[in-house]
Amino acid sequence: MTPVLLPLGALLAASVLAAPMAGAAPQADRPASAPSGWEKVDGAELAEITKDSDATKQAPLAEGKASARAAEPDVWAFASRYNGRFVATEKSYAAPNTGVLRARSAEFGGSWEEYELEWDDATETYALKSHANDRYVTVEQNYTGNTQNVLRARSTSAGGWERFVLWYDETDDKWALQSASNGLFVTMENNTTGKLQYVLRARSASVGGWESFDLYSVI
């Protein structure tokens, strides 16, 4: 089955954020670092917007690639708004960087760029599970230097370091991820060189170009 990407921005603006969801958290309950103009998106909202198939488009699938994936839970792809590349899990990297997330794929190629977003009602956060290695994405807070808070798909369960908040900016049609464990936003490290160029790190106190992503539903 050839995957199709559903761009979520316009559909979300028209259907979900236009009317408050029942039981949505009030503004005062949001984190102090909540960016102005952004809306927190919960699991019910994501489920609602993927019901509409009219906005689907063909994925920019890499030449020679095909998806053998049958019907599965909702699957997503992230692309950096800054460099235009899809986020991939580097499952072939050697330790200690096995499974790091990098915005490095010019085309959507399949499982390495696929992630499940699992909503948890108790914490009102998401866990990201990579299809490349079937592991949850972790914020590596114990790493040091330019790899501190790097995102790695390496955990078999979702605890505190694996929880994220998803934000949407309707005005500019862009998305952001915030680590629930350290309160910082995920950045695409455009200026990092070598094998970790474009790596994702939860290290920013605000949202700018490097923290903005496009979000697609893979169907």
Image (spheres, rainbow, N blue to C red):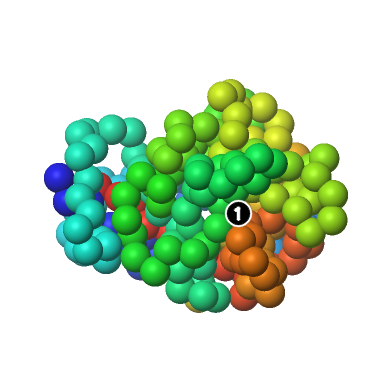
Q: Quadrant of residue 39?
A: bottom right
Q: Residue at x 33, y 59 (%)?
A: 108
Q: Is residue 138 left or right of residue 53?
A: right
User: Can see residue 80?
Assistant: yes
- Is 196 situated above or below 99? below
Q: Residue at x 43, y 63 (%)?
A: 105
Q: Residue at x 20, y 34 (%)?
A: 70
Query: Residue reaching furthest front?
Result: 94
- Is 113 situated above or below 207? above
Query: Residue reaching furthest left?
Result: 1
Quadrant of image for the N terminus: top left
Q: Quadrant of residue 186?
A: bottom right
List the residue tagged with mark 1: 177
Q: Residue at x 55, y 58 (%)?
A: 102
**Residue type pointed to by label 1:** Leu
- Is 180 situated above or below 123? below
Instruction: Tally the numbered discs.
Output: 1
User: Can see residue 13?
Assistant: no
Instruction: Out of 39 and 137, give the one closest to the viewer.
Output: 137
Residue 143: where, in percent of width, then height?
Answer: 80, 45
Residue 211: where, in percent of width, then height?
Answer: 63, 66
Residue 97: where, in percent of width, then height?
Answer: 65, 45
Residue 204: where, in percent of width, then height?
Answer: 75, 62
Q: Is residue 96 left or right of residue 155?
A: right
Q: Is residue 138 left or right of residue 46?
A: right
> How packed is label 1: few (under 14 Cα within 10 Å), some, or many (20 or more)?
many
Local secondary structure at mark 1: strand
Q: Is residue 194 left or right of residue 116?
A: right
Instruction: Out of 77 and 51, give the one closest to the viewer.
Output: 77
